[in-house]
Structure formats: C-alpha cells, structure tokens
Amino acid sequence: MNFIRYRATDEDGTFLDEFATNAPDFAKERIDRIRKYRPKLTVTETDDNH
C-alpha cells in the first residue's frame, strides 16, 4: 500500500495535525475540518512508505 503523510500548519507555521493514510477522501475530509477554523492552512504531503 502507498501511504501519504499529511502535515498541516497554520499561516504562522504552528503545527496543527499530522497523519498518514492511503485514502485521499479521508485526508480531504480531515483537512477540510481543520481548514474550517484555520482558513490559511498549509498542508504538505510526503511519501510515507519505508
């Protein structure tokens, strides 16, 4: 399985969330929940396969 690690920070670079998943729909839903409260969210995606 191919997992992607998502890391969310706000506009000041403050860490908000980090998780790995192979389900893009789940990732979008989780990120959208955070974005609701922090609209200037930055999300970085990296390969999480070791």
Image (tube, grey):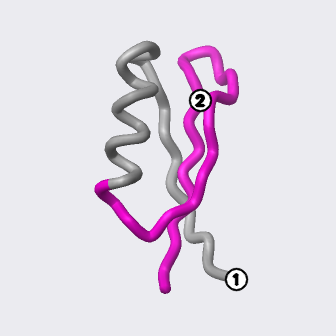
How far is disc 2 from disc 1 in space, using C-alphas? 24 Å
Q: Is residue 48 magenta?
A: no
For label 2, the crowd category at 10 Å Cα-Cα, with few meaning under 14, some 14 to 19 and many 20 or more, is some
Confirm or deny contact between disc 2 and disc 1 (CB under 8 A): no
Percent x, y of residue 27: 40, 51
> Identity of the amino acid at label 1?
His
**Who's the residue at 49% across and 40% down the image?**
43
Q: Secondary structure at mark 2?
A: strand
Left or right: residue 9 compared with residue 26:
right
Identify the image quadrant of the C terminus: bottom right
Residue 9 is tagged as 2
In this rendering, is residue 11 above or below 19? above
Percent x, y of residue 37: 43, 13
* Residue furthest left as drawn: 25
The span picked out in magenta is 1-25
Q: Secondary structure at mark 1?
A: loop
Looking at the rendering, which quadrant does residue 34 occupy? top left
Percent x, y of residue 26: 37, 53
Percent x, y of residue 2: 48, 80
**Who's the residue at 41% across and 37% down the image?**
31
Sequence-first tag of 2 and 1: 2
For label 1, the crowd category at 10 Å Cα-Cα, with few meaning under 14, some 14 to 19 and many 20 or more, is few
Q: Is residue 21 magenta?
A: yes
**Who's the residue at 63% across and 15% down the image?**
12
Left or right: residue 22 compared with residue 18:
left
Q: Which residue is mark 1?
A: 50
